[in-house]
Image (cartoon, rainbow, N blue to C red):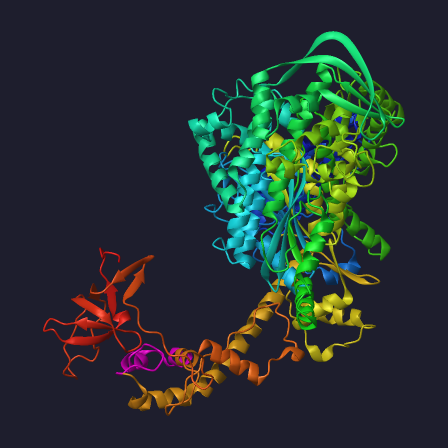
Amino acid sequence: MATLGLSKVFILDKYFTELQKYWETEKKLQDVSSSNEAVHLQQRLRSLSSELVTLRNRLYVQGENANSQTSQQQNSSLHASHTTNNVINAINTCHNQTTSILPPTLPKNQIPIPPHIPNTLPHISDSVGKQIGYPSDQKSNLLVNHQNKTPVHNGQLQDLIYLPGPLTEDAVLKCLHARFSAKQYYTNVGPILISVNPFADNKNPLTLTSTRSVSLDAKLLKVVDDAVRQQSETGYPQAIILSGVSGSGKTYASMLLLRQLFDVAGGGPETDAFKHLAAAFTVLRSLGSAKTASNCESSRIGHYIEVQVTDGALYRTKIHCYFLDQTRVVKPLPNEKNYHIFYQMLAGLSTEERIKFNLEGHSPHTLNYLKCGDVKQDETDDSARFQSWKVCLGVLGIPFMDVVKVLAAVLLLGNVQFVDGNKTNKSHQGIDASGIKTTAVISEVSVAGESELNAVSSLLGVSAQSLFRGITSRTHNTRAQLVKSFSDANMSNMVRDSLAKALYCRTVATIVRRANSLKRLGSTLGTLSSDSNESVHNQADVASQHASTVGTAGSKSSKSMAALNNAVRHATDGSIGILDMFGFEDPKPSYLEHLCINLCSETMQHFYNTHIFKSSIESCRDEEIHCDVEVDYVDNVPCIDLISSLRTGLLSMLDVECSIRGSSESYISKVKSQHRGNPRLFEPKPIDGQSFGIQHFAGRVSYDASNFLETNKDVVPDDLVCVFHKQTCNFGFVNHLFGSELKALYSSDIVPRGIRFRISPTSHSDLLNGDEPVSTLTQDFHTRLDNLLRSLVHAKPHFVRCIKANNTEMSLIFDRGAVMKQIRSLQILETVNLMAGGYPHRMRFKAFNARYRLLALSCKFRCTEERADEDCHLILKSLEQKQDIKQQHTEVSMSWAFGKRHIFLSEGIRQHLEIRRNETRFRAAVIIQSVWRGWHARKKWPTLKCTLLHPSNTNSGHVIGTGLSSRTVSNIAPVNTINNIAHMNGGTCGGATLTRPRPQPIAGTPPPDPNEKCDTKMIQQTCNLFGLDLERPPPVPPSRPYTVTGNKKLGYPQTRIMKMPFPEDIGNGTDPTLMKGDTVIVVGASNKRGHLVVEHTNHNLIHVPFQFLELKSGQLAV
C-alpha cells in the first residue's frame, strides 16, 4: 500500500549511510601523509558525491512518478511521502544542530548535501535511464532508447562501460566479483581486456605445451583476432601488452594468446614452428622462473615475443629477453627459491648421471646456493618436468650433457669456500715477456671444499690449479705497470659468485639465441635481440659468411637473390608482439634487481597512462573539443624521474658512485640530500643508513642498498676469463660462452692485463671500444627498456590488464581487499569513466571515410580531401536517419565531435559503427557469393548435362572424377550436384580432357625475372636427361599392394563390411547383390579408379567403390 513511501525510506537510509562514508573519507583526507593516498581519497570523495547526487535525484524522480498513479495510490503515496518528508525534516534539523558542515537553514524537503558536491554531474545517470547535464547542442548526437530496459545481472555484463548506475570503485568490484563467481575471468572495458587470475591450475608450468588443453575464452580470442585483422588491413605493427602485479597471470595469458595466434595465422600446434617455440618456452620456463613470496611461478625474465606476419600468415617468431635476476643464482631470499631448473635437475637425474656430474649425495639441504632459501620440493613433479626439459633441449638441438655440466658446476661452486690463511704478504717484481715491469703481491688464501673445487674444474674442462689461480688472483693496470695480487677471502668469494652468475646468464642467453635461430626463409642468425645483450658471435663474421654465400653464381643469380630478399623484407615489415614483462613486487628485503623490475612496471604503467588518458585529454584540448567527463588519473612520471632521471635519478647517482668507488652509506646520504622533500621518497622505519623507500604506483617499497654497488658493477676479471681459453680449457661449450671476451682479450699479446668484463654476454663490437665494461647493469637494463619502448611506440597497442584474485594463491578465492588495491593502482575506474562518457578514440577524416563510407549512399560523397569532414557528417547523419543508434540498456555515451583534423568518437558509437560495418560487409559477401555461385553453376551446367546423358563418358555408372554413381548424383539436391561436379570437373563433355585448377603461387613469392627465361633447347635437354616427354603427361602410378589406416599398412586380402547395398538399383541387373552389413573379402585394388576387387560367396569378383566398404577392426598390419 505504501510501497513508494517505503522505497523512499530505504533510499534515504542509504543516502545517510553514504553521507557518513563521505564525512569519514574527508576526515582521512585531512590526516593523509602521502600524495598517492590523497589522490585515491579524493577520487573516493568524488565517487561518493556522485552516488549522493544520484540518490537525491531518485527521490525526486519517484515523487514525479507518483503523480501518475490512481487516486487511491496517490492518497497512499502522498501519506507515505508526507511521512518521509517529516523524517527528512527531522533528520535535517538534527544535522543542523550537531554538524557545522551543513548550511544553517535548509528549504523544505531539502536533503543535506556535503560540501564540494556539485548539484549536477554530466556523467551521472539516474535509475530511469535519463542522461543528466548534457548540453542542449549535443542532444542530436545522443539518442537514448528508454524501451526494453531489462536489468542485466553483473555476472552477465560483458563490458564495464555498460555498468548501470553511478560508476564507482565498488560497482566495478562487485561486477568483477560476480563474473568471478560465474567463472567468467575476462571482462572488457571497451577495447581493453581485464583478466582475473583465479589460480585454478597452480601446478601448471605455464608453457605452450602445458596450456594446450586449456579452453580459450572468446574475449581472449578477440584480442588476437583484432590484432591479426588490423595488421593485415593496415600493415601496421601490433603489440599485445600484458601488465599487472606479480602473480596476476600475465605469463599464463601470454601463452594462451600465443597459442591462439598460431591457430589463426601459424597453421596450428602441429607445425614445426609451433613445436620449436613450445620447446623453447619449456626450456626457458625452467631456467627463468622461480618461487617468490608472492608467486610460485614467477618469471624472472621478461619476454617480448615478436611474431612476424605476412598476408595473415605467420612468417617467423623471435623471443626478446629482458633482464635476468642474477643475484638469485647465488643468494635467493629466505622464503624464496632459486631457479626451478636446479631442483628439477636434482630430482630428475639418474644415479649414474648424478655420479657423472659429481652430484652424488647432494640435495637442496647440502648445496649453499639452495639451502639459504626454501628447500621444500615436490620431487615427483620436478622429475617429470626435468624429463620434459631434457626432451625439449633435444628439439632445439642443444646438447643435454653440455648444459647440465655447466648447471652442476654452478651448484657446486657455492660449496667452494675461500678462507684467509696466513697474514704474511710477499712481494715480487719482474719483467714480463712484453718488457713491461710487473709487481706481484702475494697473500695466502686457502680453500675449504677442495673436492668441490676439483669437481667444478673437471666439469668445466680446466685444471683445479688454474681455476683457483683465476679466482684468487687479480691483475691491476696502474700507470702502464701491471700489478698482480692475490685477493683476500672476501674478494675471492665475490669472484666465485660472479663466475657462477656469468655461467648461468650466458647459458640462458645461448639457449635464447638457439631458440631464435629456426632456419626459415629470410631469417637471420639468432641473437638474443637487437635491444638486448648481443650474441657472442662476431657480427662482422656473420656478415662475411653471408657475403661468401650470396652472389657467387653470376649476375642472374644475384638479381634473383636481390628480388627474393626484397620480397622477404617487404613481407616481414608487419609484426604482432606479445609483451610479458615483470610485475610489480614488494619482497622483504628488496635489492637492486627489484628496483629495476619495479621501474619496468612503472614504465609500462606510464605507457598505458600516456596512450589511454594523456593522449585523449591533450587531443581534445588541442582541437578545442569539450568533453563532459574529466578523468583525473594518477601520473607516475615523478616516480620514474626519481629513479631514472638523467643526472639526479637514483640509478644515475648509483653509476657515479660506482665510478668513484664509493660506499653504500655515501650513496644513501647523497640520495637523501638530493631528493629531500620529494614526496615519492620516504625513509623506512626503523631508520637505517643503508635503506630507502619509494612510493610506487602500486604501493610503498623499502630497498636495501647494502649490495647496490657490487651488483651494479656486474663484472668478472680477465684473470678468470682467460682460464677458459681453448689452450687451457678442453670444454668447447664454455669456450663458446666466453667467445667474444676471449677474442677481445687475446687480440693483444699481454694476457691478462687488468680488464673487467660484464657478467652478462656482450657483443664483440662493444668490447673493442675500450678496456673497461661499456655499461653497468642498470645502464644496460635502461638501454634495453628504452629500445622496447621505441618498438611499442611504433605499434598499435592492445592492453590486457591482469589482476590476481588473492595474495595467497588459493584456488577460486576472491579477496576483495587485494582486488580493490589493484583496481586503484591500475586505474580501472578512470578507464571505465573515460570509455563510458569521454572521447577515447579519434580518427582522421579520411581514415573515417575509408572505413565507414559503406554505411551511407556513395552518390552523396564529396570524394575530396578538403571536404572529407562533410562526408563524415553524411555517414553519421545516415545512421541517425535510420534510427540506427540504440542505447543498450545503459547510459553509455553515443556521441561524437568534430575537431580540426580528427573526428572524436565515444566507445559506444565506435562499437556500434563496427557492428554496423561488419553486418554490411557480411550481407555484401553473401550477395556476391550467391551471384557468383549461380553464374558458375549455370556455366558448368552443359558439362554436367552431357556427363549425365552420355553413359559412354561414365565408368560403370560413375561420373568421371567424382567417385559417385549416377543414381547417387541424381538423388543429390540440384545446387549441391552442380557445385560438386563443377569443382571436380574442369573440362567439357564429349570425351574432352578434364583438367585440374592450377595451384596459386605462395604468398610473398617474387615475380619471375623475364631475363632469366630458359630457352626451348635447355628445356628439351632437361627432359631428355630425366626421361620426360612434354607431349604426354606422366603415366598414372600403379596401385599400391596395401592400404594405409591409422598409420599402419594393411595388405591384401582384407575383411571388410558393406556400409550400404551395392549396386543401389537392386533387381535391375544380373550382378550379385551385396547387402548392408555383409562381410566380404577384398583381394586387391581394381584397375578402376576408386574401386576395390571384392570376392563374393560364389567366387565372383566384383569391382566395388571403396566408400561402400568399411574396414573390419582387428586387421593385422603388414
Where 369 falls versus 281 (above or below)?
Answer: above
Q: Residue at x 47, y 31 (%)?
A: 382
Q: Is residue 886 visible?
A: no
> Total label count?
0
Q: Position of residue 336 (x, y in %)?
A: 59, 24
**Figure quadrant of the C terminus:** bottom left
**In x, y percent, where is residue 978?**
40, 81
Left or right: residue 521 versus residue 638 is left
Query: Quarter-wise, where is residue 633 in the image?
Result: top right
- Viewer-closest of 479 and 586: 479
Q: Residue furthest left?
A: 1098
Q: At 61% across and 18% down in the image, what residue appears? A: 416
Q: Which residues are magenta?
A: 956-979
Q: Which quadrant of the figure has residue 647?
A: top right
Residue 395, magenta (yes or no): no
Q: Nearer the viewer, residue 466 or 900?
A: 466
Residue beneath the point at 56% across and 57% down: 148
Residue 450 found in image quarter: top right
Is residue 968 a member of the stretch shown in magenta? yes
Residue 551 rendering spot, x and y as whole percentages:
69, 65
Q: Position of residue 1035 (x, y in %)?
A: 38, 79
